[in-house]
């Protein structure tokens, strides 16, 4: 199972904002993680639309967490960011060409594994990810 780069970057933005606890810029986050500002802008835009991040416009603008770290559930956010977790071809009815789909039992097993994956993530929040704030601050500076 693999999350998209989009979800990875979105989670990094949330971690950064949670660790810093104050307004930040996309450029600042891009530099801290050494990743593309353009990719981050798309991730941040989506996080703003979903209500996880608030955007402050203007010369002294930036972005801040839109919710408390305790209320950002990892399972929920991954499901919202990864609406089509097509782990195997047969998960997508439109593009599935697998000849054994009608008799294959693998799909059910993988669906069970995916549910367990999301259930495990659902036990944690952003607050859990930033408990080691001091170590994260040192690494992100």
Image (cartoon, rainbow, N blue to C red):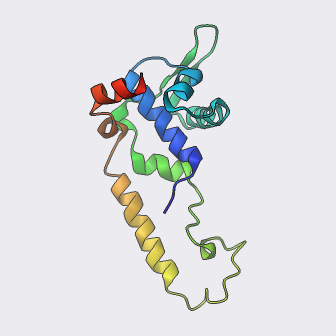
**What residue do we see at 30% from left, 39% from top?**
128
Outermost residue, bottom side: 103
> What residue appears at the point 48 percent right and 50 percent down from the top-left corner?
78
Location of residue 27 (image quadrant) = top right
Residue 52 can be seen in this image: no
Identify the image quadrant of the C terminus: top left
Q: Where is residue 75 in the image (x, y as percent from the top left)?
A: 41, 51
Judge by depth and name the residue closer to the eye, 14 or 53. Answer: 14
Q: Where is residue 29 in the image (x, y as percent from the top left)?
A: 52, 26
In this rendering, is residue 111 above or below 10?
below
- The residue nearer to you, when weighing 29 against 125, is 29
Which residue: 44% across, 26% down? 17
Q: Position of residue 25 (x, y in %)?
A: 55, 20
Give the image quarter of residue 118: bottom left
Estimate the x, y position of residue 67 in percent, counting from the top left. 42, 30
- Residue at 35 percent of width and 24 percent of height: 137
Q: Residue furthest top?
A: 59
Quarter of the image for residue 116 reads bottom left
Q: Can residue 40 be seen here? A: yes
Q: Is residue 58 left or right of residue 28?
A: right
Report the number of discs. Answer: 0
136 on left or right of 48: left
Of residue 11 and residue 81, the one placed in the foreground of this image is 11
């Amino acid at each position: 199972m693999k999350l998209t780069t989009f979800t990875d970057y979105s989670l990094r933005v949330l971690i950064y904002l949670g660790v810093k606890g104050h307004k930040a810029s996309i450029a600042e986050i891009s530099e801290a993680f050494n990743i593309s500002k353009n990719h981050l802008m798309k991730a941040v835009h989506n996080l703003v639309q979903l209500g996880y991040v608030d955007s402050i416009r203007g010369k002294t603008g930036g972005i801040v967490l839109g919710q408390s770290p305790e209320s950002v559930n990892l399972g929920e956010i991954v499901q919202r960011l990864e609406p089509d977790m097509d782990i195997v071809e047969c998960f997508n009815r439109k593009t599935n060409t697998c000849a054994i789909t009608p008799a294959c039992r693998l799909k059910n097993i993988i669906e069970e594994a995916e549910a367990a994956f999301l259930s495990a993530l659902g036990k944690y929040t952003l607050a859990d990810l930033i408990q080691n704030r001091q170590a994260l601050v040192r690494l992100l500076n």
